[in-house]
Each structure stands twice: as structure tokens, then as C-alpha cells.
Image (tube, helix red, strand yellow):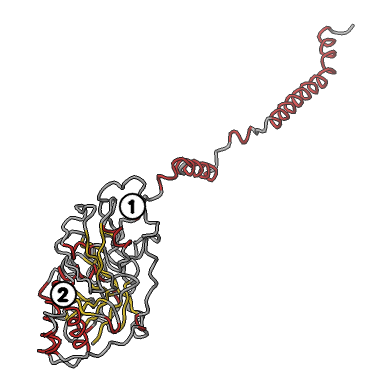
């Protein structure tokens, strides 16, 4: 008879391996299912528990920084400099914006030239600044720049192709005697005598003084001599301004010249019907270095006449170049700023200490000997004692009152400036 305990133990022993196999199979199945689920979800338990790599974090942070700091399209304009900011450095050639006209800026190598010529900044009152229009135009009247009264553009002149100066036909005593009877003929003959180079210094001074007397009424006054080919008259119309009158009359001079000749103090206080004296000539200049004097002429060739002479200061160490010059395009400035090319010191407009005064006229050489002379000009001065001396950085300087006349007379591209030893 079998024992109960043995019989029970005997029945359990054969079933143990089957149960273990079932448990292992079940666990494997669960693990397989779990693995499949993790794989399908794109995650790995080991990856989820792994420490993030520094490279991944750094790249993520960099992207966030770029996205945070990059301006949006709407804000992009705030990062660009404004026009005012771009022009803030206009006092030097290096910082002048590319779109700004050259207007009296010197060539980049100006400071390296032997003379170190003066360098005005680009800012200042434009030569084309116009006064306020006198009054409203009459009904139906056209006052624009276009129309039959607008002069045609004047072609550039060749300064080396001027007609030769004619010889005088009378001697000095005869010319002096004509001043009271025929001032126009006297002025012409006196000019030819001066230009001939035959007068002794005292006689030349006498001729210059006589011309100054003649031009006191013929030129620098509102009186018009009908026989004077250098002048005409213009009757102001409603809506006119002096700058417009200058264009309509075909003036080869600045409109401020009209104010000077007619004694006008305020360009806005002119009236319709007023008759003005207006020059019709082109002006030229000759600078005689040995005399420290500038000669201002009206007309050219055999018909040119001397208008006035002014003492000048020249470049130290004889640095003012010689030859034929014309005005540098866009170079005329009223009340200019200026930076000293040697020291870097900057002078604002209206600064009473500005060494170049209230006017700047840039020059450029036009003959073979001075074609690279682009860094010189005619200007005023705050040091009148330097007139008659070699004291500038190469430029021609005049007293402030004198340079205003030269500024009004010389124009681009019409005027020629000859500098002789």
C-alpha cells in the first residue's frame, strides 16, 4: 500500500518542469511585447535613462540664442543706421557716405602732399540755396524753371583755349585822361596796360587805382551804363526770386552778386516792377604769387576787363601750385565745417575760430603740370595778418569781405583761375 505522503510527492515531481517552462515562456512573451511597444514608440529605456550629451545641449542652446537675437523682418529696419547717423562722420573723407557729393572734400591723400592743403568738411550751406519767393504768381503765370525764359545749360570752357590778350593802343597818361570822359574805354585800355607787363610798379598801382574808381560806378553800383556790354537790366515779375532771376538772365555768377550790385540787404524784400542791374559776363581770376594778389576779370581774351584786385595769402614754403585751374564740381560752400588734416581738429559751421572763414571754393588743376592738384581752394581766413605772406597749407586765402566777392563771381564750369609765379 503506498504511503500517502509518497504518493503526493510522486504526483508533484513530474509537473515542476512544465510549470517552470510556462513561467519562463510567459516572462519572455511579456518582455518581447514590451520591447516591441518601446520600439514602436521610438523610445529606448536605456536612452531615456541616459545622461544628455553636452554637444546636444550646446547645439540646442545655440539655436535658441540665434532665434532669440535675430531680428524679425518687421524689426530689421531698426538695426540699420539712419541717414543722420551715417552722415555724422561727414567731417572726414574716410567716414563720408558714398552717396554724398564730393563738394569740396579733398583727395584722400591730401594730408600726404607737400602742402597738406586745407580740407573742408562736406557740410555747409549749399551754393544753390534760394531765398523765399517774393510773392504769389499772377493768375496763369508760369514761374517754374521750365519755359522760354530758362537759359540753356552753358558748356564747359577750355581754360587753355582763351584768345590771347590784346595789346594796349594808348599809353598810361592817355588812358588815365579817359576816365572822366569815356570810362568804358578807359577801363579796357587800363586793363590791357596792366596785362602787358610793361608798367613799372608805381605806374601799375596808378592804373589799378584808376580802374577801381571807374568800377565803383560802372560795376559796383546800381547805375547802369547803356554802353556797358557787361551789364543788363531785369524787371522783377510777380513770383520771382533772385536765384530764379539769375537763371532767367543767364548769369554766369552766383545770385548773391545781384544783391551786391543793387545794394539789396534782404533777398526776400524785393518787389515786382523793380529794375535790377544784372551782370552778363563770365568771371575769371589770376593769382600772381610774386605780388600776393588776385586779379578778378570780367569777360575773356582781348575783351576782358579788370574788375578788382585783392591781396592774398599763399602756401607756406611756396607750396601753392601754379598753372590753370577750374572749380572743382560742387565745391562751393557757404559757412563750411572744416577738419585740420594735420592735427585732426574739427571746426563746426559758425565757429568764429574756423580758420577757413565763411567761404570755400575748391580748385582742380586742368593742365599737364597740375592735373593731380585736387586738394586746394580759395577761402577766407580768421587771421588777416597772414594776408601777404606764405602762411597757408597751400591754398589761396583772402580777407572775408574779399572772398565773398570772389565766391559770387567764380562759377563752375565757366570760370578759369590761373596761378602764376
Q: Is residue 406 visible?
A: yes
Residue at position x 26%, y 80% in the image: 304
The quarter of the picture where residue 350 lies is bottom left
The circle drawn on residue 364 is none
| Residue 213 spot, x, y in % from top left | 11, 77
**Element class at badge 1:** helix
Whichever of labels 1 and 2 marks the residue nearer the N terminus, that label is: 1
Image position of 98 with respect to 320: above or below: above
Residue at position x 22%, y 91% in the image: 169
Q: Which residue is mark 1?
A: 85
Q: Nearer the viewer, residue 309 or 331?
A: 309
Q: Nearer the viewer, residue 356 or 407?
A: 407
Distance between mark 1 and mark 2 Cα atoms: 49 Å
Q: Which residue is mark 2?
A: 215
Circle 1 packing at 10 Å, graded few (<14), some (14-19), many (20+), is few
Q: Is residue 93 visible?
A: no
Say left or right for 95 vs 295.
right
Q: Quadrant of the C terminus?
A: bottom left
| Residue 64 spot, x, y in % from top left | 49, 40
Please say if the residues under marks 1 and 2 sit with CB atoms less than 8 Å apart. Answer: no
Image position of 268 with respect to 360: above or below: above
Q: Quadrant of the N terminus?
A: top right
Say left or right for 353 vs 57.
left
Say left or right for 159 vs 203.
right
**Element class at badge 2:** helix
| Residue 175 spot, x, y in % from top left | 15, 86
Amino acid at each position: 500500500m503506498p504511503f500517502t505522503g509518497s504518493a503526493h510527492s510522486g504526483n508533484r515531481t513530474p509537473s515542476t518542469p512544465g510549470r517552470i517552462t510556462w513561467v519562463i515562456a510567459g516572462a519572455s512573451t511579456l518582455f518581447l511585447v514590451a520591447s516591441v511597444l518601446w520600439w514602436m514608440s521610438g523610445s529606448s529605456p536605456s536612452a531615456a535613462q541616459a545622461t544628455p550629451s553636452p554637444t546636444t545641449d550646446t547645439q540646442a542652446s545655440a539655436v535658441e540664442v540665434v532665434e532669440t537675437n535675430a531680428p524679425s523682418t518687421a524689426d530689421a529696419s531698426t538695426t540699420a543706421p539712419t541717414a543722420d547717423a551715417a552722415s555724422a562722420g561727414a567731417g572726414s573723407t574716410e567716414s563720408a557716405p558714398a552717396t554724398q557729393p564730393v563738394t569740396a572734400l579733398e583727395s584722400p591723400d591730401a594730408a600726404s602732399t607737400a602742402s597738406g592743403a586745407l580740407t573742408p568738411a562736406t557740410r555747409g550751406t549749399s551754393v544753390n540755396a534760394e531765398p523765399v519767393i517774393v510773392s504769389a504768381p499772377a493768375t496763369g503765370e508760369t514761374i517754374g524753371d521750365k519755359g522760354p525764359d530758362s537759359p540753356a545749360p552753358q558748356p564747359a570752357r577750355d581754360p587753355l583755349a582763351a584768345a590771347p590778350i590784346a595789346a594796349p593802343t594808348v599809353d598810361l597818361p592817355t588812358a588815365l585822361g579817359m576816365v572822366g570822359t569815356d570810362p568804358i574805354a578807359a577801363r579796357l585800355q587800363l586793363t590791357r596796360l596792366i596785362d602787358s607787363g610793361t608798367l613799372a610798379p608805381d605806374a601799375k598801382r596808378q592804373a589799378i587805382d584808376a580802374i577801381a574808381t571807374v568800377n565803383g560806378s560802372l560795376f559796383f553800383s546800381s547805375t547802369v551804363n547803356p554802353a556797358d556790354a557787361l551789364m543788363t537790366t531785369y524787371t522783377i515779375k510777380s513770383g520771382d526770386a533772385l536765384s530764379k532771376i539769375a537763371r532767367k538772365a543767364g548769369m554766369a555768377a552766383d545770385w548773391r552778386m545781384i544783391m551786391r550790385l543793387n545794394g539789396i540787404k534782404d533777398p526776400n524784400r524785393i518787389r515786382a516792377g523793380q529794375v535790377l542791374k544784372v551782370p552778363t559776363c563770365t568771371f575769371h581770376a589770376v593769382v600772381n604769387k610774386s605780388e600776393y594778389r588776385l586779379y578778378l576779370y570780367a569777360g575773356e581774351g582781348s575783351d576782358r576787363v579788370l574788375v578788382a584786385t585783392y591781396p592774398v595769402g599763399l602756401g607756406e614754403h611756396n607750396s601753392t601750385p601754379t598753372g590753370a585751374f577750374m572749380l572743382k564740381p560742387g565745391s562751393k560752400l557757404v559757412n563750411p565745417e572744416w577738419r585740420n588734416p594735420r592735427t585732426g581738429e574739427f571746426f563746426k559751421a559758425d565757429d568764429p575760430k574756423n580758420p577757413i572763414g565763411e567761404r570755400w571754393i575748391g580748385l582742380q588743376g586742368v593742365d599737364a603740370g597740375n592735373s593731380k592738384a585736387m586738394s586746394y581752394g580759395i577761402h577766407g581766413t580768421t587771421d588777416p595778418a597772414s594776408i601777404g605772406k606764405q602762411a597757408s597749407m597751400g591754398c589761396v586765402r583772402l580777407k572775408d569781405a574779399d572772398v565773398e566777392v570772389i565766391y559770387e563771381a567764380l562759377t563752375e564750369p565757366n570760370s578759369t583761375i590761373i596761378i602764376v609765379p
